[in-house]
Amino acid sequence: MIFESHAHYDDEVFDEDREVLLSSFAEHGIGTVINIGASMSGSEATVKLAEQYPFFYGAVGVHPSEVEELDEDSFEQLRALCSHEKIVAVGETGLDYHYPEPAVDLQKEWFARQLTLAREVKLPVIIHSREAAKDTLDIMQALRAGEIGGVVHCFSYAKEMAREYLNMDYYFGIGGVITFKNAKKLKEAVEYIPIDKILLETDSPYLSPEPHRGERNSSLNLPYVAKEIAAIKGLSYEEVVERTEENARRLFGL
């Protein structure tokens, strides 16, 4: 069964048909979903989804674009959510320099705090890094993030950066971007990364693969991603699905 390692089904774009969509997953071969918190409200909604659907698990964290909402009180609330039996990771957390706000120093502070939280609660971490390759890696190395373990979600850098994360024994979340014609650098990285370090993800509702680029994404599109990885690595589709599920279960302790 396909293991969806990164989706945001708490997003309001799913409000109209969430139950119908999620209830269709089993018949389409989607066996497990990790819903990812990107804000305090999103993390709380993730817990509720994990409680509602047996095949759902969750990660709780605050995306770098949302760190202005964090303070000591909310951070303690985040820590409390980590103790829920169906929360299997901290995140997504990291750095995002695509927009000028929030301030870089603020992003770095709360990234480091969430990495430390993951270490304290003994959960892997889900890393978001956009246009911030060096700073992300520097912070992770300084805090010995290899001891924490986790996944670089929506990996978008070249194979040289993949080597650095492999040295920390991290996994790589690969989604719809791998199907884009202009994703040469990512295709080269996926060719380089061992199959036992790759996870399937969509980042739903974002980043739909070809031929649905620009549409609302969902886990139903994961076969496009698995088929592209299979073609790049010279494996069968079935082997990619099986190996990536094994990888995800290993990382998240399921």
Image (spheres, grey):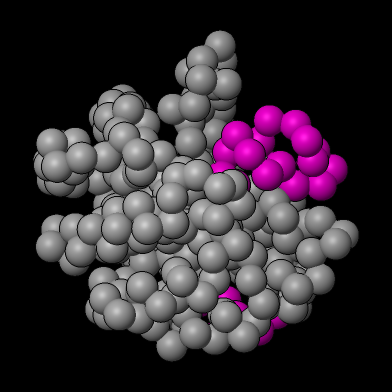
Q: Residue furthest top?
A: 16
In this rendering, would 176 be left or right of 83? right
In this rendering, would 173 be left or right of 81? right
Residue 53: x and y, percent? Answer: 35, 29
Q: Residue furthest right?
A: 181
Residue 252: image quadrant is bottom left
Q: Is residue 212 magenta?
A: yes
Q: Which quarter of the image is occupied by the C terminus?
A: bottom left
**Magenta stretch, residue numbers:** 191-218
Residue 68: image quadrant is top left
Give the camera-side residue of 18 and 118.
118
| Magenta stretch: dominant secondary structure | loop
Q: Identify the residue shown where x is 37% and y is 58%.
A: 105
Residue 113: x and y, percent? Answer: 23, 58
Q: Is residue 250 magenta?
A: no
Viewer can see residue 95: yes
Relative to 228, does residue 101 appear above or below in the rendering?
above
Viewer can see residue 38: no
Relative to 96, does residue 170 appear above or below in the rendering?
below
In this rendering, would 40 be left or right of 32? left
Q: Identify the residue shown where x is 48% and y is 36%.
A: 8
Residue 51: x and y, percent? Answer: 26, 29
Q: Identify the residue shown where x is 30% and y is 80%.
A: 142
Residue 74: x and y, percent? Answer: 19, 36
Q: Identify the residue shown where x is 36% and y is 43%.
A: 67
Give the camera-side residue of 232 and 135.
135
